[in-house]
Image (tube, helix red, strand yellow):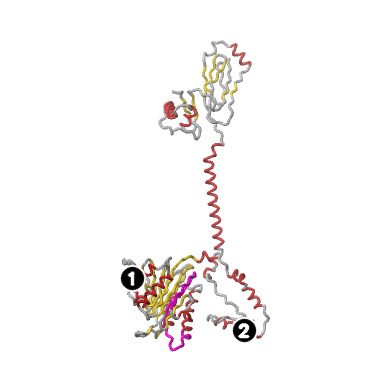
Amino acid sequence: MAKSPRAALTRLATSVAARYYPASGANPGFYLDGRMPGRRDRDSVDITLDREDRGFFYSVYASLSGGQSAETGNARVRKALDRVQADVRQPGRNIDNEINDLAECAVHVAGRITLQHEGVLQPYFAGLVVRDSELAAVTMGNACAYLYRGDVLYPLTSDDFPLEAVDMQGRPVSGMDVYCAGIAGTVRYSNIAQLQLDDCVIICNKEIMDALGQRDVLRLLYEAEDQADAAGLIVDEAASRLPGVPMQFMIGFVESIMSADRTGRFGTGRSTSEMMTGFHRTVATHAAAPASKKASAAAAAAPAAVAAAADPGDLAASPHGDPVPVLEDDAYDEYDEAAYDGYAAEGRGRRIAFYLIIAAVCIGSLFAIYNMLFGGDDEPQTTTITTLATTEGAGVTTAPSQTGPSTSESESSQEPSDSSTDESSDTTSDTTPPETTVPTSETTTAEPTTSETTTTTTTTTTTANSPVTLPTTYTVQSGESLWAIANRFYPDRDVELMVDAILDANDIIDPEMIFPGDILTIPAVP
């Protein structure tokens, strides 16, 4: 019992090539997804069909008319084949049901297998069904079914033609009979095979394999450009080696396999299709027709007309004589359940949320990169340098100071008051030290040197253009390196030598081991 697969659309390009000769016994024919031999196909056949669907049914056969006319026999065979074709395309069907129906169709078409006689064509049947990219095959009599994959010809049923477990180059292959299931009476069954891209499914009569052999069939399949070329080459070669014998060869190439949910989600529903085709207007017109005895009789006979519509030649008629199209069930009704309601809207909301998250992450990344590259240039940096203020007698002398890059303007003010000047003149030299050095920083006020002398000194940061008296001290700012500091204080000297001088003056071994806020001693030029 195979598991229930998801709905899958399979695209098959199928070609059939045949050579027919007058012979007694069974009448050969083929069934190519609804098409059978016509009047133009009495001697040879070369047809290609490219379709995409969830289900396919192909067959080559030879059936006995049983004393009936050719037209009656063909109608009987077509009815059995069309029934399998209709079941394959119905929703809710699986591959297990199709195998049983295909076996009944084989018995109905081929009939009883009799003893072989020379010059008499015995009945045979080879059919395969594809449903949701799964494959199953049934054979009877001198019919063969194969799966061509990876230069290896795998038998789908246990037919009478022996195959070697080798590929086209003669290399051994394991698992040749993995797709063969068993035999029930005269019917040979296959296991369920999962189709893959570039696979080829083949059904033919055994006379082709007898005429060519396994090696030549593999060679022709490898040399052919496509499935149509392969069918023509194989039938022509077999007919030349075994003339006068009817030959039939059908091959289908798997072009694509895709989930039916992705395409069905954006397709038009039944209500939309009816609105576009105008079918609802036709139904409304017939519903609004006045009731009469003739209409009542036609309404009573409606169930019989619908039952007779299984025959392609019949079509239910409306009370006015116009044909009323019979709606087929939606191919995806098995997913038309409450659990699937709102599935498309939910998936659309998830996609929108995912796109919004991706957009937010991208915007945040761009903002972070911009701040990393250009964000530091707009913020002013303040550098504080400690200078030396020297007071001699009653005068105040302030050494010039320099700061790093700063956006503030340099301001130097020195505001001695009259009272302080008078007091300074009255003080004696005994009360004032000969020389006093007071370290000052940005916006600082010097304490008075004596109890009677008051000196106020205010020093602010200066621009980078003012000269710097070395030695001095420097506070490391954020983002500065030792090389940048050396280049600032020693612009005309070798940077490497100045870096070494700063390292020696501060007892630093590794030039990378400086951090914002560290106070460095900037030595004089060596």
Toward the front, the furthest residue is 240
Quick one: label 1 or label 2, which is nearer the N terminus?
A: 1
Task: Name the residue beneath numbered marker 2.
Answer: 298
In the picture, the disc for residue 215 is 1
Secondary structure type for disc 1: helix
Q: Is residue 472 visible?
A: yes
Give the CA separation, mark 1 to mark 2.
Answer: 63 Å
Q: Residues within 10 Å of mark 1 (few under 14, many from 20)?
A: some
Q: Is residue 339 visible?
A: no
Q: Mark 1–mark 2 contact, CB under 8 Å?
A: no
Instruction: Inspect the image, locate mark 2, and give the three-letter code of the amino acid beneath it.
Output: Ala
- 257 and 29: which is toward the camera: 29
Toward the right, the furthest residue is 290
- 230 and 84: which is toward the camera: 230
Q: Residues within 10 Å of mark 2 (few under 14, many from 20)?
A: some
Task: Please name the residue shown 68% across and 81% down the image.
Answer: 290
Task: Please name the residue shown 42% across and 66% down the image.
Answer: 198
Q: Which residues are magenta?
A: 44-73
- 348 and 1: which is toward the camera: 348
Q: Is residue 17 above or below residue 430?
A: below
Secondary structure type for disc 2: helix
- x and y percentages locating residue 294 in the rendered image: 65, 85
Q: Is residue 45 covered in magenta?
A: yes
Q: Give left or right: position of 320 versus 433.
A: right
